[in-house]
Image: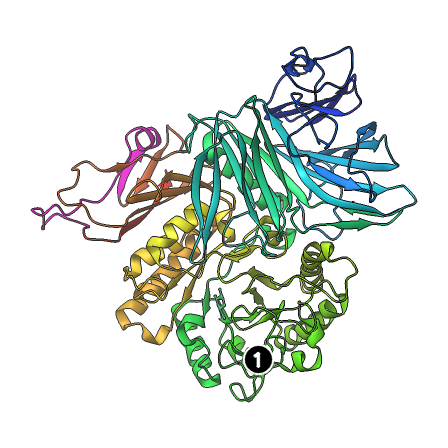
Amino acid sequence: MSILVNQQQFHLTNGKISYIFQVLKNGQLGHLYFGKALRERDYRHFQRTNNPTPASCHTYEDDAAFSLETIQQEYPVYGKGDFREPAFMISDGQKPIANFVYKSHEIVKGKPYLKGLPATYAHTDEAETLLIVLEDTYQQVELELSYTIFKNEAVIARNVRLINKTDGALSIDRMMSLSVDLPHADMEMVHLSGTWARERHVKKRKIEQGIQSVSSIRGASSHHHNPFLALTALDATEHIGEVFGFQFVYSGNFLAQTEVDHYGTARVQVGIHPMGFQWNLSPGETFQTPEALMVYSDQGMNGMSQTFHRLYRHQLISEQWKNKDRPVLINNWEATYFDFNEEKLLHFAKEAKELGVELFVLDDGWFGKRNNDRSSLGDWTVDLEKLPDGIASLAEKVKSTGLQFGLWFEPEMISPDSELYREHPEWAIGIPGEHFTLGRNQRVLDYTRPEVVNYIFEQMKEIIEATNLDYIKWDMNRNITEAYSAGLENQGEFFHRYILGVYDLYERLTSEFPNVLFESCAGGGGRFDPALLYYAPQAWASDDTDAVERLKIQYGTSMAYPIYSIGSHISAVPNHQTLRETPLSMRADVAYFGTFGYELDPSSLSNEEKEIVKAQIKRYQSLRHLVRDGEFIRLQSPFESNETAWMIVSKDQTEVLVGWYKASSTPNPRTNQFVKLRGLASDRGYNVDGEKYFGDELMLHGLPLPVEFNGANGEQAERGGDFQSKVFYLKAE
Ligand code: GLA
C-alpha cells in the first residue's frame, strides 16, 4: 500500500484500488479518480478543465474553462460557482461562504483514533493515512481531511475535522463525512430499506438528474433505511461488474445521497443529516465527523459485500470478539413475554441446557415492576416479586447448570411510571412542561447529559458485577421526538450529542467489562449499523423470525455486514410476527447462517423435536467456524424468485456450506435442478452426502438438489410442498 504524492497530486493505492486527487489552480482540491488500481503516473488529464460549458460561472476572467460547476471536487464548498450540494456549510453568523485551499499534508502509518467515535482501526503495518489540511481564505478556519487506505482491502475510510482558529464562534450547518464526484451516472442505486419486521430489504433504482437519497431523522440509523448505499454499473450483477459501496459508521441521523447533475455526473455524499443539525464551535475548538467508508468492487455486489465483511471482521469488531465463536443462545422473550418467575426460568434453563444451548438470556421484565411495557424502564433493580432471591442468585443458579447468563437492558429509556422518572422527570427528552409524544409507552433519556449516562452506567455496573454477567442485549425501542434538552444551550447539537452519549456508555461498559458479549437491538433491527458493531459484535437482525421473511432480511443484511454479526434465531410456530408455519428444519437451515439461537419454550417441544434441536445445535457448533470466518457468497436472491441460495467457503476452500430454500411449491417442476456454486477449488474433489463432485463441475454445472415431488413421483420424491430447504456440507478430499 502506498500514498504517492507528486506535484500536489495524491494517489492512494494498494494494488486493488486507486484514489486520486490533486490541488487545483485555485488551491481547492479536485477529484480525479476512484476505482480499480491504476499505475503510478500523472492523471491531471482526468480533470476536464478545458471544456467551457454554456452559461456556467467561471473562477477566472481569462479562463472560462475553469468552472467549479463542472470540475470534479474533493470536498466542495458552497458559494464559489458549484451549484451542487456542498459537503459542508459554516458561517460566522454572517456569510455562509467559504473557500478552502490546500495548506499542507502529512502521511502517517496506521490510522489515527477518532476520539469518542467508533471507527475502523488499524495497526501501523495494516494501513496508511493521508491527512490534508485546508485553510479558508476568508477566515482562520482549517479543515483536516483524513483518508485511510488499508493494506489488502479495496476501501478508503474518510473523516473530516474542522478547527476554529478565529477568535469568534462559528456555526457548522452541514458537514458530511464523505463527498465524491464520480464522472458519470449510468448506474443504479441500491439501498437497504424497510420497516419493523422487514428490515434491510434490497431496493434498486436507476439514478436520474436530481437528488436521490436515503436518510434518517429519527435519532437512530433506523429500521427504515440503513446507512448504506451502493452505485452499481448497469450491467453489474451479484458477481460481475463495477460497484461502489458506501457505509456510514454512525448510529444517529444520517444522510446518504447521490446527486446527478445536468451533465450526468454523480456526487455521492454521506454524513450526519444536516436537517436540524447546527453545531457551535467556539474559538480553538474542533469538530470531528464520524467515519464514512467507500468500497470499490469489480466483482459485483458480492465483491463489495465480501470487502465490507473482511473489513468489519478484521478492522472494526473489537480484538476481543472478532475471532471468537459466538455462543448458541436461548432467549425467553417469545416463550414467556413478561410472565415468568424464578421457577419457570430455571426449568426453562435446565431444559435448554439439556438441548445443548450455551447461553441463557433473560429478556425484558426482570426489573422494577415491569409486568407489561408501561413501566419501570430506568429502574434497573430486580423485581423481587418475580425473582424473590434476587438477580445474582438467579444468575448463579443458571450458571450452575453449566449455562452462561445474559440479561436484557434498554439503557436509553425511561418509563413515566418509574422511580427514576418520579425523581428526575427532567432527565427525559422533551420541552419541560409541554406535551410529549410516547412510543411504546416510554420516553427517551437525555444522553446529552453526562450525569444521565453516569447514572445508568452505575446501575448497569452493579448488575453486571453482581451476576458476573456474560452477555447483554442492549435494546432501544423507540425513536426520538420533541428533540430538546433543557441542559443544552444549542438544540442544533442535540441529536449528535445524544449519540455521543450512547457511544460513551458503550465505551465505558465495554472497557470495564471486556468479557461481556453485547448484542445490539432496536425493536429488532432498527439500529443495525457499523458503529454499533464496534462495541456490540452482534445485532438482533429483526423481531421477525419467520424463516421465509428471514431469507430476505438476512440476504439484505449480508450486503453490508458479516454474517456472524447477524442474530438469527429459531422461534415457535405459528410465527409470532406472520402467523406462518414453517418446518423446524427450515427455521434452522436459515438460522445457521448467522449467530444461532432459539427464541421459544423448550418444554413446548415434543420429544422428537427435542432430538432434532439437539442435532441442530451440534451441527451449528461443528460449523460455526465457517460462519465466523468463511467467505459468504450470495447465489440466488429471494427478492428475485421463489428460491434463495447462499454459501460459505472456508479460506482454504476445503469446507463449504450451502443453504438452499424454496418458499412455495411448484406444480410439475423442472426435472433437472442444480445450484451453481462459486469460489471452490476447480480441481479438488468435494464429498457431499456420500457423493463426490469436483469443484469445476459444482461451479459450472451445479450441485444437484434432492428430487422434487411432481404429482406422479411420490415414491422417489425427497422434497415437496411449501417451505423446502436444505443445507449441504461439502468437504474437500
Ligand atoms: C424489542 C426486542 C425484542 C424484545 C422486546 C422486549 O421489541 O426487539 O427482541 O427484547 O423488545 O420488550
Front residue of 6 and 412: 412
Front residue of 361 and 287: 287
| Mark 1 lies on residue | 367
Rendered position, 542 above or below 175:
below
Front residue of 405 and 8: 8
Q: Residue 66: x, y in percent?
A: 72, 16
Which residue appears at 52% of the width and 55% of the height? 325
> Is residue 111 something one can see in this rendering?
no
Rendered position, 252 above or below 379:
above
Q: Quadrant of the N terminus?
A: top right
Q: Quadrant of residue 268?
A: top right
Count the numbered circles shown: 1
> Does the numbered disc 1 mark a residue whose Cβ is under 8 Å from ligand 1?
no
Residue range highlighted in magenta: 690-719
Amino acid residing under circle 1: Phe
Q: Quadrant of the C terminus?
A: top left
Residue 217, magenta (yes or no):
no
Rendered position, 670 above or below 593:
above
Q: Is residue 606 left or right of residue 431?
A: left
Q: Residue 428: x, y in percent?
A: 67, 71
Q: Residue 565: x, y in percent?
A: 52, 52
Which residue appears at 20% of the width and 49% of the height? 665
